[in-house]
Amino acid sequence: MKNKISSIGILGGILMIYYIAPVVSLLFWKANNAMIPSIMNEDVISAMITSVGTSIVSVSISCILGIPLAYFLSRSAFRWKNIVLFVVFLPLVLPPIVSGMVLLTLFGPGSILGSLAMSSGIELTQSLVGIILAQVFVISPFVVIATKVGFDSVDEKLEYTSRSLGRTKIETFWRVTLPLSMRGIIAGIMLAFARAMGEFGATIMMAYYPRTMPTQIWVSFITGGIEEAFPVAIVLLVSSIIVILLISVLGQEVRGSYAPY
Amino acid sequence: MLHIKSIIKSIGEFTLGPIELTVGNEILVILGPSGSGKTTLLNVISGILNMDCGEILIGGKNISKEPIEKRSTAIVFQEDTLFPHMTVMENITYADVGGEDIKKIIDIFGIGKILDRSIDTLSGGEKNRVSLARAIVSKPEVLLLDEPLSSLDYPIRKRLSIDLRKILKQIEIPVIYVTHDRDIAWEIGDKIAIMSGGKICQIGTSEGIFKNPKTVVAAEITGESNILKMVVGESNGDGHIVEWGPYRLEARISGLENGKEVRACIRPESIVLGKQKKGKNWMKGEIVEKIFKGHRYAVELDIEGVKDQIRAYASLKQNETIKLEKGITLGVYFPKESIQILSNK
């Protein structure tokens, strides 16, 4: 038994090293004081603000639209449920660059929606709106799927009990279902946020400007090679880790004392 | 008062009902085997399942179309459904109905010392007490209990069932308690309803049903029973003669058609064992098995002239006086009143 556990530990350990090694390598690879001006560069700071800002908005939109859909999918049984699930998975199976292309056909300058928005003074591409449209398309399935798993894990009998004690469906959702699904919801938010921060393919198709961090890394790489791209990558990595840690801590706060869940 | 009028609910090939039931301020135990529709009935009453047709009235008000939260029918499930992210006290006050009864109910259930504990630190018995207290605190007009004690070990279940009856008698509302455990049913119920195949096949007191079961299910679920195929013979004034193989037995039954094939129930406890082997309702039986049951013995007997094997009980004293041993032959007597004819349905 002990030997089996040791083997599992070794295999898992190899994978953990494979995850951590490139990150550590990135942090220490030619890290020196000369990097600081590159990091403090106006374009890099602007890209960081754009990435963090649009990611927060995109995750929020994904939650507002995705959590009700996840609840519906978890609690309903209907004929076309698998087709709806397939649609939710669709953005995950499309290569991001293809996602950007399909979004351009819908929101691009030549499209009906794009033209309508343009006539109202709203640019759906080459704008913050464009970045958010791309990010929501790519990241919202993470929220829907992880949240659905969270809702699935809550025994419906708890909800029936709550309602038989006089609480309405909405009260039951807020007081029982949501707190007990919080682990899934937080996991979904973390995955979505990480994906939004790193989103490149769809975003660059929808909005080359304003630049997000991945776009800035790409631009730095093609203009100055890896030496130029390297400091921006570190900023992206550190800012992503900080935000994900913040979400994690906030999530723990929200879950409060629901330790087992 | 709870009135259930002609409710029917179909789920796949299973159909519940039609069910007619009236429950006053009493404890009605629905006793039936797994799959008989007991839980489905509770789910329909509580509104978890919509019925196909029929009516449910509580205190004269038709609640058939009300959502779960408007029915005032608190339900306690077999599984632990305490809210795990809340303390015991938060669970108990979840219904938010207020009132001074909460302290009293906490005292009755003896859970005053665990109010601040989280749910995952409670034992099975404590969880059951809290679940029941929470349901009663919500001041329901009808209390629905779906085998809430079945997950407990026997001694705890026994003790809690005694306490529970006392508490349920105090709240004076209609209580429906669903179980497949006859001991719990005897312990808790004022009345017993036997359920089988989605229908209630008999309703009455526990003693009444035990002594006079109407169906095979009622006979088997309320106690050990010998179910024997017999043929009704002629009337003999005091009852009927029933034929069982070569035996013509006197039975205190009436209104049966001569020559009709019937199934009869004879409880092992009403069968008399003795040395006599001939006479009315006496026959000869050979012991093929003897099982120690604590306060008595159960003996399996091959009866001369029939294929059926029957079970009878013998007291510990009888075991010494008759010397009950495997292979010995002794007299077996069916008292007239012990032969109960069951419905063929």
Image: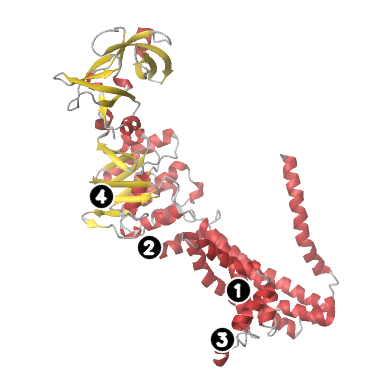
- Vertical relation: B20 (above or below) B153: below
Circle 2 sits in a helix, a strand or a loop, which is it?
loop
Q: Name the residue under label 4.
A: B6
> Which of the two residues, A17 or B65, is positioned nearer the viewer here?
B65
The Cα atoms of the two marked residues, 4 and 2, are separated by 28 Å
Residue A16 in picture, x, y percent from top left: 75, 57
C-alpha gap between disc 3 and disc 1: 19 Å
Give the residue type at disc 1: Phe
Q: Mark 1 lies on which chain?
A: A
Q: How far apart are marks 1 and 4 (CA)?
A: 52 Å
As drawn, A169 above or below B32: below
Q: In this view, does A186 lie above or below A196?
A: above
Front tag of 4 and 3: 3
Q: What residue type is labelled 4?
A: Ser
Where is mark 3, residue-wise?
A112
- Residue linked to disc 2: A168
Q: Are marks 3 and 2 on the same chain?
A: yes
Amino acid under label 2? Thr
Judge whether residue B268 can be spotted in this image: yes
Q: Quadrant of residue A41?
A: bottom right
Residue drawn at x 50%, y 67% is A69
Number of numbered callouts drawn: 4
**Chain of the residue displaying label 2:** A
Dot 4: few (<14), some (14–19), or many (≥20) neighbours within 10 Å?
A: some
